[in-house]
């Protein structure tokens, strides 16, 4: 019996990345344009050797198929590029290299310019969506689940301290409910109780209702891992603690090596996710009843 518990995740195809017709049309036209442009580049390259013939009259430099197709990320999504190959029948000739799709390039230069902008924009405004949208590759079917711990803290911040202890029990009754129906009723009770007196607190909780209850669509064994970000934060807590102390003392390469070794050491004490054998079914789209264990 295989002991491999790794479940492969399917990467979305380019056609699945963004579903609106306009973007699909732009992506298709971009594919056609790139193919024509690269072929034109190659014909220009070959034309430079038009007068270089072998003794038997054959051309010295000829087409030799195509390189393996690769996807280059652009502002309208991933574009597939297959660059022609050249072959010299006599002597060494510099092979063809496309200026539009240089070797090993996986994303357009405009995206390289956008990536450094993500950090200052996210820090100053908290809005990463505008910058990240220029990257165009997404997992459109991925469900979002908001962290109940962070959401509860945010909601309580809109309440006076004298009311926070009592109000905290309401959200807990929601995410600890046995079924979605019970959670919906507890949700409505809390909103009805605090909406009139503390509208900002009610709005803070209510506007993310679907994302807060998304975990009910997954196996019950996974709920404890989905309801909060603890499963992520706890894994990186020791790394964050030690790397912050060593900041500025080592080079970037040394820091990455140290973090890698810390992860390898820390994972020995990590607990296995509950219901990990059901991950393959979840990824495969199998539906689960709320009370299923």
Image (cartoon, rainbow, N blue to C red):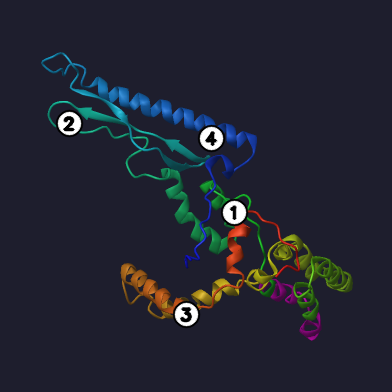
Residue picked out by circle 4: 27
Q: Residue at x 42, y 74 (%)?
A: 263
For label 4, count other residues whose C-alpha is less than 10 Å away and answer few (under 14), some (14-19) or many (20+): many
Residue 130 at x, y percent in the picture: 58, 51
- Helix, strand or loop at disc 3? helix
Identity of the residue furthest to the front in this view: 1
Give the foreground label among 4 and 1.
4
Determine which residue is flagged by label 2. 93
The span picked out in magenta is 150-167
SS at badge 4: helix
Disc 2 crowd, CA 10 A, few/some/many (<14, 14-19, 20+): few
Calculate the distance from the C-alpha at mark 2 to the C-alpha at mark 1: 47 Å
Q: Which residue is mark 1?
A: 129
Q: CA distance from mark 4 to mark 3?
A: 43 Å
Question: Which residue is situated farthest in the top direction here?
Answer: 57
Q: Could you tell me which quadrant the C terminus lies in?
A: bottom right
Label 2 to label 3, Cα distance in Å?
54 Å
Indicate yes or no whether the magenta region holds residue 156. yes
Dot 2 falls on a residue whose secondary structure is: loop
Task: Choose the circle earlier in sequence order: 2 or 4.
Answer: 4
- Alpha carbon of mark 4 to alpha carbon of mark 1: how far? 21 Å
Where in the figure is residue 254, as x and y percent of width and height?
31, 71
């Amino acid at each position: 019996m295989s002991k491999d518990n790794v479940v492969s995740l399917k990467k979305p195809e380019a056609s699945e990345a963004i579903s609106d017709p306009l973007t699909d049309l732009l992506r298709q036209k971009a594919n056609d344009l790139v193919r024509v442009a690269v072929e034109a580049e190659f014909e220009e390259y070959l034309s430079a050797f038009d007068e270089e013939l072998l003794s038997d009259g054959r051309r010295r430099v000829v087409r030799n198929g195509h390189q393996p197709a690769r996807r280059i990320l652009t502002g309208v999504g991933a574009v597939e590029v297959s660059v022609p190959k050249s072959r010299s029948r006599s002597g060494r000739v510099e092979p063809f290299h496309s200026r539009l799709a240089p070797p090993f390039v996986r994303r357009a230069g405009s995206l390289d310019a956008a990536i450094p902008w993500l950090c200052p924009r996210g820090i100053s405004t908290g809005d990463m969506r505008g910058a990240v949208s220029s990257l165009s590759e997404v997992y459109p079917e991925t469900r979002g689940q908001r962290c109940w711990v962070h959401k509860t803290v945010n909601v309580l911040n809109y309440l006076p301290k004298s009311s926070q202890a009592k109000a905290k029990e309401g959200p807990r009754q929601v995410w600890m409910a046995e079924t979605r129906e019970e959670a919906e009723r507890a949700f409505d009770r809390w909103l009805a109780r605090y909406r009139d007196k503390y509208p900002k607190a009610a709005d803070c909780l209510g506007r993310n209702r679907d994302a807060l209850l998304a975990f009910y669509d997954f196996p019950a064994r996974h709920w404890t891992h989905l309801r909060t970000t603890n499963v992520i934060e706890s894994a990186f807590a020791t790394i964050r603690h030690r790397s912050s102390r060593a900041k500025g003392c080592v080079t970037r390469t040394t820091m990455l090596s140290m973090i890698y070794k810390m992860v390898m050491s820390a994972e020995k004490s990590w607990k296995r996710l509950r219901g990990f054998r059901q991950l393959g079914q979840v990824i495969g789209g199998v539906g689960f009843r709320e009370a299923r264990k």
